[in-house]
Image (tube, rainbow, N blue to C red):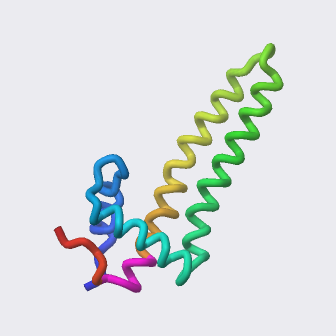
Amino acid sequence: MKPSRKDIILFMMGNDARFRSSDRNVLTKKILKTLKKENPNRYWGFHGSIYGLLAVLLIVAYFMVQDAYGDVMPYAYTMLALMFAGIPLLGYTGFKMYETYFAKHPEDFPRD
């Protein structure tokens, strides 16, 4: 049975790397490895959003360092805004990644 959106969101919220079990860790690695082969657009869409956000933050940080003796607060606010804007971006792309995997492999969803 295909998991619902609520089930996938609860799976994502409980999938923190600091607290997850070894079974959940193996499943997460399997999901990433499988998606990289079966659906690379979703896989690289998620990782591309991470790398893109990091690149934009580094560019803003570079300009902040260049203007070190000027007013750096606009750069700091820009970086803060980018980090807050990145939360829904990473959440959405991560959700779509898990949704794509569990649509093809619903038997792998952990039923705790």
**Image quarter (top left, top right, bottom left or bottom right) of the C terminus:** bottom left
Relative to 9, is 1 above or below? below
Q: Mostly what secondary structure, the magenta segment?
A: helix
> In terms of depth relative to the viewer, which is nearer, 72 or 37?
37
Residue 88 horizontal/vertical position (percent): 50, 53
| Residue sitting at x 64%, y 61% | 48
Q: Residue at x 28, y 75 (%)?
A: 109
Q: Residue at x 70, y 26 (%)?
A: 74
Q: Residue furthest top?
A: 69
| View extreme (right): residue | 66
Residue 36 falls left or right of residue 69:
left
Q: Which residues are magenta?
A: 100-106
Q: Is residue 110 above or below residue 78?
A: below
**Quarter where residue 11 is shown:** bottom left
Confirm whether the magenta stretch covers residue 53.
no
Q: Write the residue at 56% across / 70% down.
A: 43
Residue 47 at x, y percent in the picture: 59, 61
Q: Is residue 102 above or below residue 74?
A: below
Q: Quadrant of residue 72?
A: top right
Q: Quadrant of the N terminus?
A: bottom left
Residue 8's spot in the image, x, y percent? 33, 68
